[in-house]
Amino acid sequence: MKKILDSVADAGLSLWRSTQGRRDSGEKKRIVFLCGKLYSNKGEALGTALAREVVDEYSILSDDDKVVFFQHLVDEYSVDKELIVESFKSYAGNTDINSLASLRKAIESPRMNLFHRINLAPEGTKTLIGMRDDLAQYLKPNPDFKLIDEDLKNQLISWFNRGFLTIQSIDWKTPAHILEKLIAYEAVHKMGGWDDLRRRLEVDRRCFAFFHPALPDEPLIFVEVALTNGLAPAIQPLLEKKEKYSNVENENTAIFYSISNCQSGLRGISFGNFLIKQVVLEIKSELPQIKNFATLSPIPGFKKWLDIEMADTDSQITLTEKLVVAKLGDVFDHNLMHEDEDFHRIMMKLCSQYLYLAKKDNLPLDPVARFHLGNGASIEKINWCGDTSENGFKQSASMLVNYSYNLKTVESNHEEFVNNDKISVSKEILKIIKN
Amino acid sequence: MKKILDSVADAGLSLWRSTQGRRDSGEKKRIVFLCGKLYSNKGEALGTALAREVVDEYSILSDDDKVVFFQHLVDEYSVDKELIVESFKSYAGNTDINSLASLRKAIESPRMNLFHRINLAPEGTKTLIGMRDDLAQYLKPNPDFKLIDEDLKNQLISWFNRGFLTIQSIDWKTPAHILEKLIAYEAVHKMGGWDDLRRRLEVDRRCFAFFHPALPDEPLIFVEVALTNGLAPAIQPLLEKKEKYSNVENENTAIFYSISNCQSGLRGISFGNFLIKQVVLEIKSELPQIKNFATLSPIPGFKKWLDIEMADTDSQITLTEKLVVAKLGDVFDHNLMHEDEDFHRIMMKLCSQYLYLAKKDNLPLDPVARFHLGNGASIEKINWCGDTSENGFKQSASMLVNYSYNLKTVESNHEEFVNNDKISVSKEILKIIKN
Amino acid sequence: MKKILDSVADAGLSLWRSTQGRRDSGEKKRIVFLCGKLYSNKGEALGTALAREVVDEYSILSDDDKVVFFQHLVDEYSVDKELIVESFKSYAGNTDINSLASLRKAIESPRMNLFHRINLAPEGTKTLIGMRDDLAQYLKPNPDFKLIDEDLKNQLISWFNRGFLTIQSIDWKTPAHILEKLIAYEAVHKMGGWDDLRRRLEVDRRCFAFFHPALPDEPLIFVEVALTNGLAPAIQPLLEKKEKYSNVENENTAIFYSISNCQSGLRGISFGNFLIKQVVLEIKSELPQIKNFATLSPIPGFKKWLDIEMADTDSQITLTEKLVVAKLGDVFDHNLMHEDEDFHRIMMKLCSQYLYLAKKDNLPLDPVARFHLGNGASIEKINWCGDTSENGFKQSASMLVNYSYNLKTVESNHEEFVNNDKISVSKEILKIIKN
Amino acid sequence: MKKILDSVADAGLSLWRSTQGRRDSGEKKRIVFLCGKLYSNKGEALGTALAREVVDEYSILSDDDKVVFFQHLVDEYSVDKELIVESFKSYAGNTDINSLASLRKAIESPRMNLFHRINLAPEGTKTLIGMRDDLAQYLKPNPDFKLIDEDLKNQLISWFNRGFLTIQSIDWKTPAHILEKLIAYEAVHKMGGWDDLRRRLEVDRRCFAFFHPALPDEPLIFVEVALTNGLAPAIQPLLEKKEKYSNVENENTAIFYSISNCQSGLRGISFGNFLIKQVVLEIKSELPQIKNFATLSPIPGFKKWLDIEMADTDSQITLTEKLVVAKLGDVFDHNLMHEDEDFHRIMMKLCSQYLYLAKKDNLPLDPVARFHLGNGASIEKINWCGDTSENGFKQSASMLVNYSYNLKTVESNHEEFVNNDKISVSKEILKIIKN
């Protein structure tokens, strides 16, 4: 059995191409003409040929063309209010299955149907994701485009259901065109190039990504894992190259030190929770000696929060503390960080407070904390000088945090978090806060 | 890069399983309990574990359990009419994007959300298709279940969009567990077993199927093709085994002699049009010498129509004709079919009339004709004694028809068919009708 | 990276074909001409094209042509005695590396070089194996052909070194064209067709084969394994179909019940020892609960030996025993086998003696015993009525034997067998012999 | 069907390991002990376990250990002269097949048998290639080691027969661990890293390599091809990165601009001829519009030859010419190369003479010329300033040459070259020489 490459069949494709496009489209944009044809029943006879033309056409639109096209999608493919009103009346009078179906149909925008048909093309899904990516920059000046964004997002959520994703382990035997994307998409701890990447794929590391069958060459999200002995307290040692990498027989801990989304056209559609939990299973299956699973995470909102608190006269930070904290300048100061015990103690306390107590709408203020705690993880340990990079200093005064994923408590943690706004936290952190 | 088999990871899965099921469910069916948990936000913490449990649980339900479960899906996961009314009012007052989104949300049944979550499991999609298959037998006594069927169908149409299907060529190198399904699913000309199958995969044949990534071991639809010199007029010679099969350098025609849907849970979701057109492209790409593409199709409604016409005193069939047609008995009569020219002539004419003129709601009465003509094909030729099997005799007095797929006319044929109810037909057939 | 199919490139091949073949070959057989050209340096310029022509040409030779061709290989491609004598003299005078190399060259027949060049073609290895297969029937009337057979065998032994073989597990997902070969090649317990095969690939069975990269579609040897609880005493129950096959969590024993060589052109080149030992490793790796490994083997020489002993007045079989054994007729007699205890006891004893004591050239007389005991296995248990088929009755009075492969003793057993002619045997068997 | 990874099975391997090694080996090197055991019949019982131990042991030998080990292979595994003499006498008396076989056996060194057995291990072939690589540095001080080198070379020639190699196309989708080897092994025009490599794998390039099934991760030889319009005259433009790479619909020429052997342990075993001719077929099959095939090759011996001729008072280079050539300094001089027409004319003439007329043992003096002309190629064109790199200047005064591979003349060119020492050359070159 052979999976046929669509490219092979393309040889014969031109025979199917609709021939009227350029001729008939006159003043109108060709893509508008093609979409109209695709949306109408005329397109069916051509199999996927017309959808391919729309995809090709979209790929060569200029920025201005795109705005015109998006406006057309708003003007011509939105719901018909009168039809909705009428369908509702009918439903209100008789709530049978048919009137419900009619109402449902009335409320689904014709755009959705158009998107379904564009998706017939081999690169259809990719084009729709690209469209949503493109849309992002036009949403502000064109609030109406939000209608398109909503439709696309709803559709993509359904199509990118976890059940359709495959998890793949990435290593040095992975094809280069995939690896190159890891270098490009890494969002937490940037890679300088192939050497940096290679170090992250050595025998003491693991890397996993989700893929969707319609985008076999595009990772959706990936996570980088270091296998260590005990909790890793700092990122720079993990990223350093070594002469030789030892194998992992003696390691007992998997550290998730970077997790990056790859497709901005899928923004707002969450894969991270599923990926982390699947990776825990994968690693347990490959390496039964690994008992602990934890992140080594940035605390991106800490410094900003601290600045606000420092300026706030009502802040709970005491004046004495403020005086000490004020030493923190604009650059990493080795003496201060490593020798000033007072400074160390107070900063650790404030960071713990930030993670555990700072809230917005009853949820943790820090976005990374919100994500992991929402997944059922626990705040395990705060690491002083965990990230001595410029960015690390600016985000969180060089601190990092380990969130632990304990298989036995993840469900109850999650429920407590969701139902009772309770955060799971280690005794060590609690002690720091109370001091 | 390695695609990880979910089965491998299952080793560690039990650790994630929710433990409260049996205990808490009390009198209620366990699957009801699990679905409730899965639907609620509690399920998220467990990744896909809870969805797997629902899938496992469904697989062991008895028939009675299924009815209870389906009733539960109707009672507890249907739309809330009051919420719809309220949302509509809000929308009617202010048709902004948010009110529209709220109305849309109100009108989508909670079942859809539950189905999305069941689909998280590795066998989730298969389970949902199986559910729809199971539903079929309960729809009559439980008309409410149509609500579930509708939801499932809508969801599956979206997920089984052509853009997500892959076409695969099937041959004697295909894994046995796939081939075995071809034997089971062949619906037009039954296969007796592996020998029959092998003949249909010899060097002078082609076979193609659509697969969906979530069901890699299950063909959705497949088509069997014979490569011949000129239009094949009869099915039995095509199915006969030979000493030796010659290669296809000298053939100029591809005959689609059987097309079968495989998944009854996907009934009403159409793949055939796309498959035929894709296969035309595949064959043109592999074998440029193939110039003609046509089916060799049954005429399943002809005999029944003939019986009705014969009994109808207002029928356009003349009395003289009726006297001749009356010779047609209950079994194939060699003399009659092969030596009675009058009988031959009249039957050919009536069959041509049936295909070309007999309509229902302005569409061809014959379902196979409706399908191919709707795709843009043309009625090319009627074949006397094309199918001498018992079934062939009973359906269509042993006649078969070739519908031709001409690349250059398929679009215009389709448009004429859809817009003007016009059927494309060869001059030969027209001449038979007029005689 | 894409592995290129040679067939694709064949499109352009004709450009390279030597064009002089038919023209120059005159009266001589074309294959003779082509081999001459291939052997000479002229062939090099054409890459593999000339070798392909030889392969094609051989494939259409008649039986008579083959004899002529083989005779040509003897007459024209054998060693040159004078060259050997000369080279030896030179070596005897001065045993340096060059004179040794010259002698070695002189003693290698030009045929070997020709075979190397035929092997350049994609189907070259297969053709050479086929040649050796063909040769078998001509060896008796043409003893000279033994020279060709020897050369081919020596070459194939080197090319089919275990290091180049891959072991593959065969199951119901294996491509049909491979499975079909299992049906054809099964030599111990015949399969009636696909149903029989399927039973042997159910969840309670394993099957492994060796493949060589140059023959990806041809198993070289395969072994069928049943997973059981304790030693399986009989073959028919293992081959029977069941309603349902349970999985193997509770099984503790792997029974090798059939092992078949597939390529008669590789006769005399032994793979079985390596296969069995590799399969033990594979099964231990997949199923750690399997602790015992044993065969369920035929005793093909027992009945014949018994007949000779019965007729031999000097036989160690006593007259009393002979009288009982004489009851054994020409067909399986249920009463005799199942109710006559005397008969049972004496036959078991004689069979044990046959396996343990009957020798030829100090090796076990029974060929299957010779194979397994030579591998380091042990005679574990003799099974009365283990094979009630007609063949089983004729070979061994329906008895079968388990040879056990114990990982800890296989090396010492082998050494005792090779160095001291000692056979490893269970206490149970020894007791039967002594009684 | 699943190909089993040997690594998986290794889990159970330790059970088979011979346990006596360390204990019994006493003073002797362990590898000597293991080889002795492997060579003796004792090894058979362990399947491939003992061979794996030898492979492991070899991998940790120090340089000194290797010398000891190689000496041991010479002392203990060489042919037995007396046995050869005896066998020869027996053969001389009676030249039957058995005496010939005995003589052949006597003349094959026991080392060969040992190598066969080492090859049983999964990494066996790789180890033997590594051994021959290691040997290279010890051959001078230990001329006896040439015996080992000869045995290994003979064995590897047989195992690396073209029929066992697969050609694979290399592109940016190739796994990184293979691509990394291209960077390392490129021998003609060095790559600085991944960016250089990527440029050589763009849409206007092709790259092909031979692989052997026993070394799936190691290319044996690879060739880099540029698709161009007409003969490419210079290498630097081919290696330059561009903003955008256009596809190759309009190109008509394939330029082989770099060909590199990868395995020094396979030195002296030639793959280049086969690879070039196979790649011609591959490209013709993929891109029928490509009509011309030529190299862009270095002329590595030109400058050296010129220096000798310049110093030679009997040289055919005239005094006038010498005066002009003398301008050629130690570095590339733009004015000289681009504006001194006299210099240009004379150098072109001398280079043409060098390629066409300079011989050694009747073969072209230049090694690259020898290779391509021996393959049946033709000297097509000499390119002034074709390689302006430092190395290009030093080797050949910055000139490069195109050898053309014309499908229709390659066989006759080859025969003329081999039989009559004739070189195929373009009229243009001849004209330059005559001027």
Image: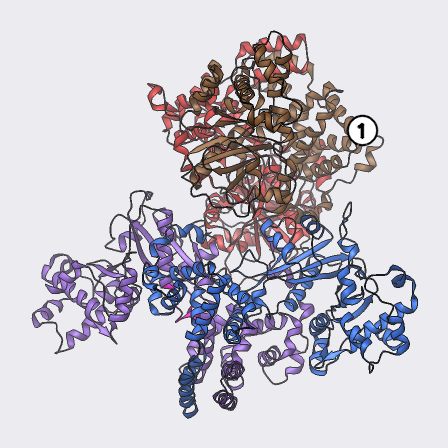
Chain colours: A blue, B purple, C red, D brown
Q: Is residue B235 above or below residue D302?
A: below
Indicate yes or no whether the magenta region holds residue B266.
yes
Q: Is residue A29 above or below residue D277?
A: below
Residue shown at 77% from the left, 33% from the top: D31
- Asked if residue B19 lies left or right of residue D158, the reply is right
Residue shown at 49% from the left, 55% from the top: C198
Three-letter amino acid code at disc 1? Answer: Asp
For mark 1, name the chain. Answer: D
Q: Residues within 10 Å of mark 1 (few under 14, many from 20)?
A: few
Quarter of the image for residue B386 reads bottom left
Q: Is residue A67 visible?
A: yes
User: Foreground: C371 or C355?
Assistant: C371
- Asked if residue A282 lies left or right of residue C305, the reply is right
Disc 1 is placed on an element classified as: helix
User: Foreground: C41 or D284?
Assistant: D284
Q: Which residues are magenta?
A: B261-272
* Pointer 1 residue: D64
Q: Position of residue A391 (x, y in %)?
A: 75, 62
Q: Is residue B133 visible?
A: no
Indicate yes or no whether the magenta region holds residue C157.
no
Q: Position of residue C292 (x, y in %)?
A: 67, 51
